[in-house]
Amino acid sequence: MGTYSLVNGKVINPGYCEVYLSQHCNLACRTCQHLSPIYNIGFFDVGKIVNDLNIVKKYYRPQGLKILGGEPLLYPRICDALKAIRETQFADKIRICTNGVLLHKMPMEFWELFDELEVSVYPGHEPDIEYLKKMAPVLEKRKVMVAVVYYTHFREGYSEIGTKDETLVRKIYDSCHIVHTWKSHAIVNGRFYKCPESYFISTGLDERFSNVSPDGIKISDSLEFGNELLGFLETKEPLETCNACLGTSGKNVAHEQQRNKHLWKEWQKKPTEELIDYEQMERSGEEIKYNKPEALLGNSEIHYLTKYKLFNSFTS
Ligand code: SF4
């Protein structure tokens, strides 16, 4: 039996699927695996997102839908975007993933438009927690989960140089919680991705991938797409992007901000071999192989502001 079940002709994902509103961010975190610090201001087309969700929902059902970026709250008509995405009924739950810096500026209508809120807090860029605490009773009534996650460290995300060592690439893939444990899929610009990194890293490394990710499959409204999707998700082979991505096995580094995109990229100009935490890779490989809970949140602390808790883990 495979990892994914098929119910009423739909591939069931016990994890979350992601869509993105902005590619840029108001922060420039050291190891952003969405490579937001290298992008100029740019928004994704909500009409295209809605169109893709309306097609894919005929063949696929995730546990929930995450809305991220970049920083999603930078999207100028955020409430209109959330309403349009909700109307697709793509998933039972919508989770907003944000750094929280702009939360206190959101209109009242915004607070009605999601089911879960995941606020990632980075040193020196704390959101207005008192404001969030004031909103918590309102959210509690709607059974909204609010998780505020404090990070001090991150794992290196990718290498600009990558590796040609196929055994290492296989190990990075086999120990990757993003694809095996969290099953974080992504839908971007008419393509379906097995992990967000296989869109963001490969399109961010233009010289190596010609600005087109080789890893997504084209979304099409046909029964063949449902079959193709299942086969794509069940394949055991590493993705092309795994040659540059570190999955969940990058070395642990202290959080930093770097707004100069060239300097930000400089950090990653080392071969994969120098950026890997080999002990972590072995440990994650074992966790996945023997279905043990992952121990990746050691450098973060979660505070819940309502009584509802996370169903599954975080993105990296
Ligand atoms: S590109 Fe490979 S290593 Fe990176 S998150 Fe995806 S599956 Fe994991």
Image (tube, grey):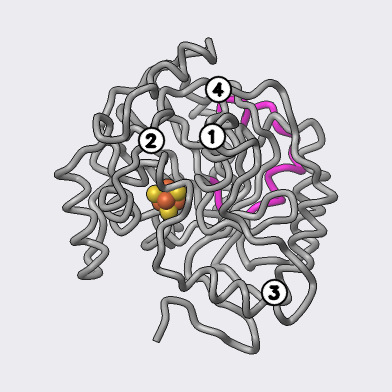
Q: Quadrant of the N terminus?
A: bottom left
**Residue 112 falls within the magenta-colored stretch:** yes
Image coordinates for residue 213, horizontal then vertical, percent: 60, 46
- The magenta segment is 101-117
Query: Neighbour class for label 4 at 10 Å: few (<14), some, many (≥20)?
Result: many
Three-letter residue code for mark 1: Arg
Judged by depth in the image, the label closer to the viewer, 3 or 2, is: 2
Q: Which residue is rendered at x = 34% and y = 42% of the image?
A: 164
Work out which residue is located at the far left of the displayed protein and give it. 279
Q: CA distance from mark 2 to mark 1?
A: 10 Å
User: In which quarter of the view is residue 273 placed?
Assistant: top left
Marker count (numbered): 4
- Residue at image mark 1: 208
Image coordinates for residue 291, horizontal then vertical, percent: 25, 69
Image coordinates for residue 198, horizontal then vertical, percent: 52, 48
- Residue at image mark 4: 37
Image coordinates for residue 312, horizontal then vertical, percent: 41, 60
- Residue at image mark 3: 225
- Foreground of the two, 198 or 55: 198
Three-letter residue code for mark 4: Pro
Q: Earlier in the sequence, mark 4 or mark 3?
A: 4
Q: Are marks 2 and 1 in contact (CB under 8 Å)?
A: yes
Q: Is mark 2 within 8 Å of ligand 1?
A: no
Three-letter residue code for mark 2: Gly
Q: CA distance from mark 2 to mark 4?
A: 20 Å
Which numbered circle lies on residue 162? Answer: 2
Judged by depth in the image, the label closer to the viewer, 4 or 1, is: 1
**Residue 162 falls within the magenta-colored stretch:** no
Q: Secondary structure at mark 2?
A: loop
